[in-house]
Amino acid sequence: MLDSIHMGRHDGSSEEDERVRRSDRERGHRGSNTRVTADKPSDDRQKSRSESERKQEGLLKRDWSDSQRDKLRNEEKSEVAKPKLPELNPSDSNAMALGKTGGVYIPPFKLARMMNEVEDKSSVEYQRLTWDALRKSINGLVNKVNASNIKNIIPELFAENLIRGRGLFCRSCMKSQMASPGFTDVFAALVAVINAKFPEVAELLLKRVVLQLKRAYKRNDKPQLLAAVKFIAHLVNQQVAEEIIALELVSLLLETPTDDSVEVAVGFVTECGAILQDLTPKGLHGIFERFRGILHEGDIDKRVQYLIEGLFAIRKAKFQGHPAVRPELDLVEEKYSHDVSLNDKISPDTSLDVFKPDPDFLENEKKYEALKKELLGEDESEDEDGSDASSEEDGSDEEEDEEQMRIRDETETNLVNLRRTIYLTIMSSVDFEEAGHKLLKIKLEPGQEMELCIMLLECCSQERTYLRYYGLLGQRFCMINKIHQENFEKCFVQQYSMIHRLETNKLRNVAKFFAHLLGIDALPWHVLAYIRLTEEDTTSSSRIFIKILFQELSEHLGIRLLNERLQDPTMQESLESIFPKDNPKNTRFAINFFTSIGLGGITESLREYLKNMPRLIMQQQKQVAESESGSDSSGSESDSDSDSSASSSSSDESDREKRKPRRRF
């Protein structure tokens, strides 16, 4: 019967259809056998067939057309396909459009227009728009703050609702500090100002930074750990955090010392060591004792050992160059510290970073507006009333301001050009007379005379060996104008205070330059009063400087003339620090120093003083005893005279008795 059906349809089909039917016929024969066996089971089993099996069986029927098969396949695909998500439009009121953290970017002008179009100010849509505006404003202000504009940024930041956006502020500060650790002290100063008005905001930030530090320490994330440690150090400097957290942090890092942990601890103590020296000197002493123990153990790398030695040098210099707070960032007088420990369980309150509808939105906004007026002192009404009265005065004030206004070169371009001109003039001249003539033609503004002396001394120090050319040039300027002489005195003091920074060659050239000026009296000798020759007050560099200075003076003047100059009574006050007589230890040190450099002849007065020192001490004691005895009354003096006569007679008798047995013997 199947064959007859296909033969009846074959009349109007093509050869291609015939091939398709033959394949269907072969599948039909295979399927007929299966259908025969499938007819045998009971009716219950037939009812239990699923709908999918029936459709699969229907595909095997050869009398279905191609269009029916395609339709069935499309129906099956539509059942398996996943449902599509609805498309989101940022302009719709659907809350899903903006996501948790803002999602789609909306231009500021469009955001302002959307906020104006919203009539219900307490609606969720308006609250979300104000949240996005608050987030963008806080991020912008935090990202552009620096040491020069922080005083202008703070009022703008207080104008934003920091109570509502405290989570946004903390997240923005931490991200900005992580991106630019060099501005950590600026962010800490900003947090200190916020802490003075809103302590809960600073406390939340401190907790999040501590939590970030814990996570970075557990994960061995060194860059993030360095940033968190530096932030905590500057928060301790600003006294936003108690100093106990600094001691806990250093103890944690040095408990099991490794190269990285010791390096992080050294950086932390360098940043906040100055404030710890004032607040907890005993705690800082314990930290350095631990560093000393690690250094003696020698288990860490050489590079880290050098870091520890550098930290001890910084401590010896009383943390100069590493102040706790820079003057321009010391903005808070009344400081409030938070007691947060590393062992506390801290909740970061990340829900504050995400938008949540506020049922009392309008009331909270009004409260912050009143608080903002108290903080910033905004009196709009007074400004409007006084604007008309002061309009005429403003015109005259503006004219006066224009006359007083002068352009200030903050880039120091003129100063750089002046130094370049002086340098080229010195280096291109044939002799010192030509150089002095050219340098005197340079027009210097008041206060720039010091640059001439500094550049002359700098050029002298850069030479491989000392050239007499620079000494003669400096002599010429000292003789011409007393201002240059005073400037060279200041240069002498500055160079001696920073002598440890100079290399040996530069140190030698500078010492010979000043020795030349002193030898020809171009520089007054009272500048030597700044030098104090004791074992405690000198370093290896300063001793080399003093050695070369006095050796050059002896070559210029001769040992006899130099000794006469040093023995001059008018010079004794200035030379007390070089030839000390306050302590025998310092006197011996000075004598040994000058003897070791071949100038023992100038220490004769010190040697005599040291030799006669016991006799002088006895004389001083006698004078004190005589002054005490001379304070008695006149009556007691007469009694003492009688007593003394009696004592003298008795003493004579005792002497006679002593002599008698000697004669007998």
Image: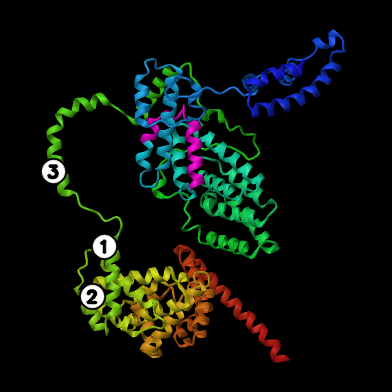
Tell me which residue sits at (81%, 19%) in the image: 32
Q: Is residue 259 left or right of residue 209?
A: right
Sequence-wise, the earlier of marks 3 and 2 is 3
Inspect the magenta stretch and tell me whether residue 168 lies in it.
yes
The prevailing secondary structure element of the residues shown in magenta is helix
Secondary structure under the numbered disc 2 in the rendered image: helix
Kindly identify the amino acid type of the residue bearing the numbered disc 1.
Asn
Sequence-wise, the earlier of marks 1 and 2 is 1
Kindly identify the amino acid type of the residue bearing the numbered disc 3.
Glu
Q: Residues within 10 Å of mark 2 (few under 14, many from 20)?
A: some
At which x and y percent is residue 272?
53, 50
Sequence-wise, the earlier of marks 3 and 1 is 3
Q: Residues within 10 Å of mark 1 (few under 14, many from 20)?
A: few
Along the viewing direction, whichever of 5 and 75 lies nearer the viewer: 5
Q: Which residue is mark 1?
A: 414
Within the image, what quadrant is residue 15 found in?
Answer: top right
Q: Which residue is mark 2?
A: 439
Measure how far apart labels 3 and 2 are at the Cα level: 40 Å
Q: Is residue 112 left or right of residue 294?
A: left
Along the viewing direction, whichever of 278 and 201 lies nearer the viewer: 201
Q: Which residues are magenta?
A: 155-179
At which x and y percent is residue 63?
70, 18
Q: Which residue is mark 3?
A: 399
The label nearer to you, 1 versus 2, is: 1
At which x and y percent is residue 543?
48, 76
Within the image, what quadrant is residue 133 found in?
Answer: top left
The label nearer to you, 3 versus 1, is: 1
| Residues at marks 1 and 2 touching, judged by CB atoms closer than 8 Å | no
